[in-house]
Amino acid sequence: MSETLEATVAPAAGHSRYTRNNPYLSVVLANYLLTAPGSEKETRHLELAIEEGMTYTPGDAVGIVAENRRQAVDEVLQALGFTGSERVLDHYKVEIDLDEALRTRLAIGKLTRGSVTQMAKLDPDHPRLKSMSGAEGKALAEEYCYGREFVDLATDFPGLIKTPQQLFQVLARLTPRMYSIASSQALHPDNVQTTVRVVRYEAHGRERQGLCSGHLGERSPLGSTMPIFLHANGNFRLPEDPSAPVIMVGPGTGIAPFRAFLEERQATGAKGDNWLFFGEQRRKLDFLYQEQLEAMHKDGLLTHLHTAFSRDQAKKVYVQDRMQENATQLYDWLERGAYFYVCGDATRMAKDVELALLDAIARGSNGTLDHAAEYLAAMKKQKRYQRDVY
Ligand SMILES: Cc1cc2nc3c(=O)[nH]c(=O)nc-3n(C[C@H](O)[C@H](O)[C@H](O)COP(=O)(O)OP(=O)(O)OC[C@H]3O[C@@H](n4cnc5c(N)ncnc54)[C@H](O)[C@@H]3O)c2cc1C
């Protein structure tokens, strides 16, 4: 067995000594744009070094522990009138500077209802804060939190936070962000790759950016370091049988685990058929991994590659439309024992894809939607319908 193939049968991720509380300090080996200038999206490909003994399986995720950016920390210090050199006790009662706490321990990014409720406790008679706290204030608080960060709360309700330590009461802990792994370790033994969409938006008069994706998009040049850990996901796995067909629906960054699946099937010589549905806004600007996917299609690894670029024509077309256009063949594949996978947006895409899948089953089997639901439930039981949506 070759060295690369041995890597595929190594233990699953999570067997390494690195965890979210004890991350590995990785080095950025690659960080480049996948979308072209002019795209409305900013999606990047990242390659992060791992050390010997750190193993992952396609379907797993990598956790990235990002810090709050300098500017965001300074804005909070200024809003509260602190210098940053004040001493505070962190969640483990370790004494550190407030500046470090704001940088590495506290979630000063997107505002949560919990912070509003905690802030209200600091001034129980404050009418506006009172109206937004607890279960009764849920709707008002959600409306207030949308598009806001902690600095907005601190600015809108000045003078309530009197000591730096109170920030540990008001703010949640800074948590790592998860990213689906986009590579097979059989091909890349010493690094892990991801596909990251950088979150940027303007709200309430400020330029905002996602904590972790912003860090990856702006402050992670080649050679810089980043704390990471590998996270196993046993519920998103290629079939054990290498000859089983797989159908993958992964628009946008949802492509990531399917690039890993395809690389794995390529590296191991798996004979099963592979069918990919990919979608984005515009072919010219947003076709992530176009060259690699088209080469896989040409080589026959990808039996079918169906794309849906919603903004390339007057009528928007999505992956679920491509599924419907190919419903007969899709059902044939399912009848042949195909595994069906979905990755990406949980709010709309995953639901629309499930409806298209149910429709294809109902049409293919001349059955009702109730029958299709039973068919899908049986697929789930056999682990032939797996989703990784966020
Ligand atoms: C299992 C799993 C796998 C994932 N895989 C991937 C992946 O492969 N690639 C990927 O890119 N992401 C992936 N994600 C999502 C990723 O973990 C992060 O949630 C994402 O990158 C945003 O994190 P952030 O720290 O950059 O932004 P945050 O600081 O968390 O900010 C994001 C938040 O900003 C707010 N927001 C965003 N846009 C707007 C707007 N226009 N107006 C108002 N508010 C807005 C929303 O509340 C949003 O939740 C995955 C998530 C999970 C759980």
Image (cartoon, helix red, strand yellow):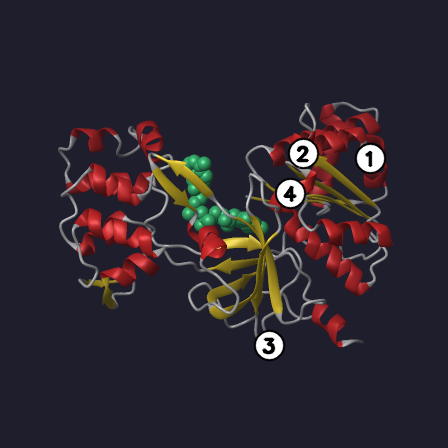
CA–CA distance in space, label 1 to label 2: 14 Å
Front residue (pair 306, 314): 314
Q: Is residue 85 above or below residue 336?
A: below
Residue 194 spot, x, y in % from top left: 59, 56
Residue wearing tag 3? 52
Kind of element beneath mark 4: helix
Residue 232 spot, x, y in % from top left: 58, 60
Amino acid on which the number 3 mark rests in the picture: Glu
CA–CA distance in space, label 3 to label 4: 34 Å
Residue wearing tag 2? 353
Front of the two marks 3 and 4 = 4
Image point 15% across, 33% down: which residue? Answer: 126
How would you rate the neighbour count of disc 1 (Cα within 10 Å): few for under 14, some for 14-19, many for 20 or more? many
CA–CA distance in space, label 2 to label 3: 39 Å
Which disc number belongs to residue 331? Answer: 1
- Horizontally, residue 136 falls left or right of residue 198, namely left
Residue wearing tag 4? 286
How would you rate the neighbour count of disc 3 (Cα within 10 Å): few for under 14, some for 14-19, many for 20 or more? few
Amino acid on which the number 1 mark rests in the picture: Tyr
Kind of element beneath mark 2: helix
Residue 373 visible at all: no
CA–CA distance in space, label 2 to label 4: 20 Å
